Amino acid sequence: MAINYHSSARLTERCRCYIWQGRGNNCNTLLLPAVLRGGLPHVLIDPGSIRNELGEPCFDSLTAVMERDGFRLQDVGLVIGTHCHPDHIEATGPVVEGNGALFAMSAGEDDFYRSTAPMFFQALGVRPPELDVSFYLGEGDLQLGAGDNRTTVRVLLTPGHSPGSVSLYLQEDRVLITGDVVFAGSVGRTDFPGGSPTQLRQSIDKLSGLDAEYLVAGHSTGVGGIIAGRDNVRRNFAAVKMFI
């Protein structure tokens, strides 16, 4: 019997989270179901690795758990990358190739991906996917869908862990998706190529001012991967600011 390495959490009608629970490294993934017009209605954020350093089938696990929830990767019309590290975007390749889905990340991260990131991939023994960015994510509101089904995603440029990292804020649902900027009880590393402790502090200050009911981190810590409750989110920001 296949082993599922993800657990599924439905935060709101417009946001479902797939938390990575394997032994090796991989990111948490988010799905915004049925928010786009047309035959490919789903948005996938950070699809993660195909296989990690322990050989765990990250992408196959994500596919299986999504299908158990009634969602198919074949119905994804847009993939968003918070940043271009392998454990966040390697599996973008098969989604884009299989569906003709669009792919979006920031212009700064695309520059980093084309210049420095390939060496980072190779150092980890991962072949970088050949990705063409369909459109760039800039600071401001990204409108998905139309009419009563319109969903607004606020894009925030939050460098520090990576030079073009973005965080995403679902305004109506008060869900904050932080990538690897801030975790539950911890912060993203800055010793990778393109990292900056100063920029990370500024990015965390920026995010801490948002009214978030849920904070969904790019990776889980011992505390977890999702912080629920406005007061708990605020306490987490206050705690991480003490040691950055």
Image (cartoon, helix red, strand yellow):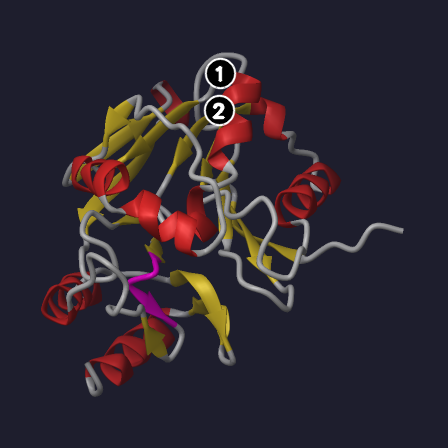
- Element carrying mark 2: helix
Please tell me which residue is depicted at 61% across the width and 49% down the height of the picture.
51
Q: Is residue 212 left or right of residue 94?
A: left
Residue 98, image quadrant: top right
Residue where numbered disc 1 is placed: 100
Relative vertical location of residue 144 with respect to residue 91 in this rendering, above or below = above
Query: Is 88 part of what is drawn in magenta?
Result: no
Q: Specify start and end residues of the magenta stretch as a single range.
A: 179-183
Tags 2 and 1 touching, CB below 8 Å: yes
User: Which numbered circle lies on residue 96?
Assistant: 2
Instruction: Residue type at mark 2: give it.
Output: Val
Please tell me in which quadrant of the rendered image residue 237 appears: bottom left
Q: Secondary structure at mark 1?
A: loop
Mark 1, Cα crowd under 10 Å, few <14 / some 14-19 / many 20+, is some
- The magenta stretch spans residue 181: yes
Q: Residues within 10 Å of mark 2 (few under 14, many from 20)?
A: many
Q: Main secondary structure of the magenta part?
A: strand
- Cα separation, mark 2 vs mark 1, equals 5 Å
Q: Position of residue 85 (x, y in %)?
A: 37, 50
Residue at (29% x, 39% y) in the render: 153
User: Which quadrant would residue 142 be assigned to in this image?
Assistant: top left
Judging depth in this view, the residue of 102 and 205 nearest the camera is: 102
Q: Is residue 47 above or below residue 94?
A: below
**Number of numbered labels in the structure image:** 2
